[in-house]
Image (tube, rainbow, N blue to C red):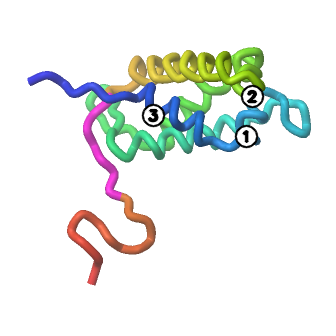
Amino acid sequence: MAKPEYDIEGVIFIRFAMVGRPILNGLAAKGQRRRRDSQCAALFALDIVKALRAQIGFRKQGEVVDDATVQEFLRAAIWDISIEDSAVLVGVDATPRDAAKRNISKRLAERLKSEFEIVLDPAFYHGNSGTGPLGPRR
């Protein structure tokens, strides 16, 4: 049976559209302090992993990898993005901005796929309401 393919690149691209402008400004050194902020990379990595974990899980050499490990790997990958590439993400013109988002999303997805095995592992998180796949707790 063929292994299902997940659109990791698409999820990351959507997270670029949804992440707050201060995060992108911090990555591009265009924020209030005019310096790159490593906390922005950590927050963006957390956001991406949460979005990915809704459907997939990560393994390495057959062992389940916790989300913190994936977040740290992704944080380092995001931090490796050059300031010039990050600056395009906060530009005024949408055409180069979207092209840069697509390019960076592709690179991040390739790095994730090369480091981890991607497996079907939906995370059933329903907030603090206590509901799950079988309904509310009693």
Q: Percent from the top left, x then y, of residue 76?
A: 61, 27
The dot on residue 118 is none
Give the labeled residue for mark 2.
Answer: 90
Nearest to the observer: residue 88 or residue 47: 88
The outermost residue toward the right is: 33
Spatial separation of the CA atoms under disc 2 and disc 1: 8 Å
Q: Residue at position x 27%, y 25% from top?
A: 5
Q: What secondary structure is found at the residue carrying circle 3? A: helix
Residue 120 seen from this side:
yes
Would residue 118 be found to the left or right of residue 112 on screen?
Answer: left
Magenta span covers which residues? 118-124
Q: Residue at position x 64%, y 39% from top?
A: 42
Question: The residue under label 2 is which amino acid type?
Answer: Val
Give the labeled residue for mark 3.
Answer: 11
The dot on residue 21 is 1
Q: Residue at position x 52%, y 17% from top?
A: 107
Question: The residue under label 1 is which amino acid type?
Answer: Arg
N-terminal of the pair, mark 3 or mark 1, is 3
Residue 94 on the magenta span:
no
Would residue 20 be found to the left or right of residue 120 on screen?
Answer: right
Q: What secondary structure is found at the residue carrying circle 2? A: loop
